[in-house]
Structures are given as C-alpha cells and as structure tokens.
Image (spheres, rainbow, N blue to C red):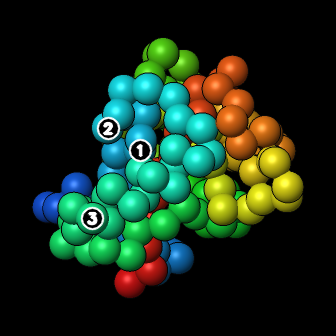
Amino acid sequence: MKNEKSRFLKNANETIYDSQTSLTWMANDSRINLKKDVSWDETEKYAEDMNGKSFGGHSDWRIPSTQEALSLFDKKKLNKDFKGGDIHLDSIFPPGAGNTTWTSETRGREAQIIFYINGFPYWYEKDDKTLSHSVRLIRRN
C-alpha cells in the first residue's frame, strides 16, 4: 500500500501551508483562539488583530473566499469540532475548531459560511450567532 503524501505542511509558526493551492492557513481557527463564536463583523476585527500582532510573521491575513474555504473540506478526512462532532478537515489542523467558517462573500446583510460537516455553503445574517460560527484566516504566499 502506497503512503499518500500530505498536501499540507505544518510550520513552526502555527501556520499550515497547502501545496495544492499555495495558500497558508492559520492552524487554529477563531473558535480555538477566542473560545467563542464570532459574528461576521467580529471576523474582520479578528483579522485586524492578527495582522496587528504580525501573527506567524505576517500582516496580510484575511477572511477566505468561499472557494478557498471549500478547498479544506475533504469527505475522506475526519477531525473533531469543539463539541466533539465530526468535521471533514485534515487532521493536521488541531481538533476543537468551529464546524463552520465565515467567508469573504457577502450580499447585503448576509455573508456566506462553509459547513465542514457537509461541505455546503450557506448564506447567514452577518450578526447570526445561532451556530458555531468561526473563521480560519488565510494568506497567499
């Protein structure tokens, strides 16, 4: 049986490089770092804060597009969200994340989220906190 080479590379600075997309992700999402759900507006502040701290040595972190966020969903991979539920993210990402991520796609008072339970995008009010909304920030190398 051939050992499958991972497309992800964990860096010492708490970031993960995706060789398939040439994107770098924060290893932890906002749910892990802040220990709470965030509204879409709070994701913008979170990105500002991470950039102000030059997290991982960079100050160009941003909210992912829908396509970028979907690129992490992999039905063959299994991880656990903060409630112990199954999400389909590579195990290189720490367990305990939110089961959704906000994206940069907006329309009026709504923004799109990606569910890592089923890989589907949905539109939600930007101030909605009924689900475990979080964000995993991204940057292009």
Amino acid type shown at disc 1: Asp
Secondary element at image label 3? helix
**Circle 2 sits on which residue?**
33
Amino acid type shown at disc 3: Gly
At 39% from the left and 61% from the top, the residue drawn is: 48
Query: Is the residue marked by circle 1 packed among few (<14), some (14-19), or many (20+) residues within 10 Å?
Result: many
Query: Which mark, by number, is residue 52?
Result: 3
Going by the image, does 74 lie left or right of 32? right
At 74% from the left and 62% from the top, the residue drawn is: 105
Amino acid type shown at disc 2: Asn
Secondary element at image label 1? loop
Ranked by sequence position, the earlier of labels 2 and 3 is 2
- Expressed as whole percent of the image width and height from the top left, the position of residue 83 reads 48, 15
Query: Which mark, by number, is residue 107?
Result: none
State how far apart marks 2 and 1 are (Cα).
6 Å
Going by the image, does 123 lie left or right of 119? right
Q: Nearer the viewer, residue 55 or 89?
A: 55
**Circle 1 sits on which residue?**
29
Q: Mark yes or no: residue 74 visible.
A: no
Secondary element at image label 2? helix
- In which quadrant of the rendered view does residue 117 lie? top right
State how far apart marks 2 and 3 are (Cα).
15 Å
**Which quadrant does the N terminus fall into?**
bottom left
- Expressed as whole percent of the image width and height from the top left, the position of residue 36 reads 44, 26
Proximity of marks 2 and 1: CB atoms separated by less than 8 Å? yes
